[in-house]
Amino acid sequence: MSDARIPPSERTRLRRLHERGRYDREAVHAILDATPLAQLGTVVDGSPRVTPTFQWRAGDRVYWHGSSASQALRAAEDGEVCLSVCLLDGLVLARSGFFHSANYRSLTIFGRARKVSDPDEKLARLETFIERLFPGRWSTLRPVTPQELKATSVLSLPIEEASAKIRTGPPGDDEPDCSLPVWAGVLPIRMLVEPPLPDPRMPAGVAEPRYLRTLKLG
Amino acid sequence: MSDARIPPSERTRLRRLHERGRYDREAVHAILDATPLAQLGTVVDGSPRVTPTFQWRAGDRVYWHGSSASQALRAAEDGEVCLSVCLLDGLVLARSGFFHSANYRSLTIFGRARKVSDPDEKLARLETFIERLFPGRWSTLRPVTPQELKATSVLSLPIEEASAKIRTGPPGDDEPDCSLPVWAGVLPIRMLVEPPLPDPRMPAGVAEPRYLRTLKLG
């Protein structure tokens, strides 16, 4: 995971994304769209704080939400944040300890968060979150109450100052080490979405939505 | 993922772990041992920084490593850090947007990092990292050179000031919503370790180590 282990050709370092090409933007969006799980970095009383959260993308912004009472969310409203998404794609086994590595896709976005304060916009963003994972679900749900909406904070960050790193492929051992009789290669890892577990409290006869069997993550 | 969505009974909040019982410590260790992937939070020039990294446990300390030149590692040496591990175990689909949630195991450890400066201790810690994932592998590898050891920083944090949160089970909808004809339940997610991909540069006849087929993550 350390920079030292990633050949420069496999890095994509993105700064001010709007100045870069369509390819960079697509690579960044693809990482965000691959998993809802992110880690939000904030500074609380001068100390670092990392909070797991769900993220979703709408256009060129990334969104997340949580309880309006959450300390991490309140810290995000007031200052700079760092949102990090990392997908572990494999363990890379080399002939020496030093060249062991990981295959992964990682994205870090920096910036100042904006709180979505307009209730209609907030609702629209929450709808996007559900619809991205489960297309067609939002309109089937019991509507959000004004009280629930008030208890939920939605924040966003422009996808602009961002750093993406991707490592793929076999270990990067020095050539002389490759003749050693040591097993080397990759142990691939992926996220598996398993068959749905229906809530026992559900009434009989509710059809299973198609998106439960088609969702792919990772 | 927000606190609002986790019933209090499902939370384990741990402060000063040495004052707590064996059960809490085991729960925390189990999360660390379930995946090598962590996110390291630091403060660089007053701004939050989150860096994906590998972590491993040795006794009551958590370790990570990287290039000695890494900015995030140097920031960690000088100040407070926050190490976060989160395993996403499922998406929780409720009858209302508000009660949608995640099943997960999350751990955040706070504290001041210590750099491992003794070369023998550093080597021993790196050995632990490899051996935890691949028992028996370390002694088969080409030995670490003094130059490689110098280029690698190993840091650690006591597993003491920590907060673990675990959510399991079906959605937490209010009872009246449960009669609605909306599909509700859990879409389980897990990390899958797939069959190994041998490096084409490996000489013929190298046996496949057993640990490649027995490693379980998540």
Image: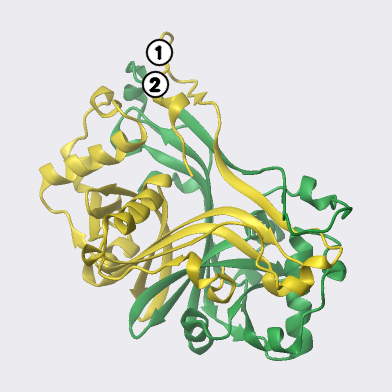
Chain colours: A green, B yellow
User: Dot 1 corresponds to which residue?
Assistant: B207
Q: Residue B90 at what x, y percent from top left?
A: 62, 53
Look at label 2 and name its amino acid. Answer: Trp
**Would you say the residues marked 1 and 2 are in contact, meaning their CB atoms lie under 8 Å apart?**
yes
Q: Is residue B84 left or right of residue B129?
A: right
Q: In the image, which disc is placed on residue B125?
A: none
Look at label 1 and name its amino acid. Answer: Ala
Q: Tell me what residue is drawn at x 60 percent, y 72 percent.
A: A160
At label 2, counting other C-alpha atoms closer than 10 Å, the crowd grade (few under 14, some 14-19, many 20 or more) is: many
The local secondary structure at tag 1 comes to loop
User: Dot 2 corresponds to which residue?
Assistant: A183
Q: Tell me what residue is drawn at x 29 percent, y 57 percent.
A: B69
Q: Residue B114 at what x, y percent from top left?
A: 19, 61
Would you place residue B88 above or below residue A172 in this image? below
Residue A53 quadrant: bottom right
Q: Is residue B78 left or right of residue A27?
A: left
Question: Marks 1 and 2, how far apart in space?
Answer: 7 Å
Q: Is residue A14 left or right of residue A5?
A: right
Q: Residue A209 at what x, y percent from top left?
A: 85, 53
In terms of depth relative to the viewer, which is nearer, A180 or B167?
A: B167
Would you place residue A119 above or below residue A111 in this image? below
- The chain ID associated with circle 1 is B
Would you place residue B113 above or below residue A217 in this image? below
Let me know if residue A2 appears in the view: no
At label 1, counting other C-alpha atoms closer than 10 Å, the crowd grade (few under 14, some 14-19, many 20 or more) is: few
Count of numbered labels shown in the rendering: 2
The verdict on a common chain for dots 1 and 2 is no
Q: Residue B146 at what x, y percent from top left?
A: 16, 39
Residue B78 quadrant: bottom left
Q: Tell me what residue is drawn at x 22 percent, y 54 percent.
A: B60
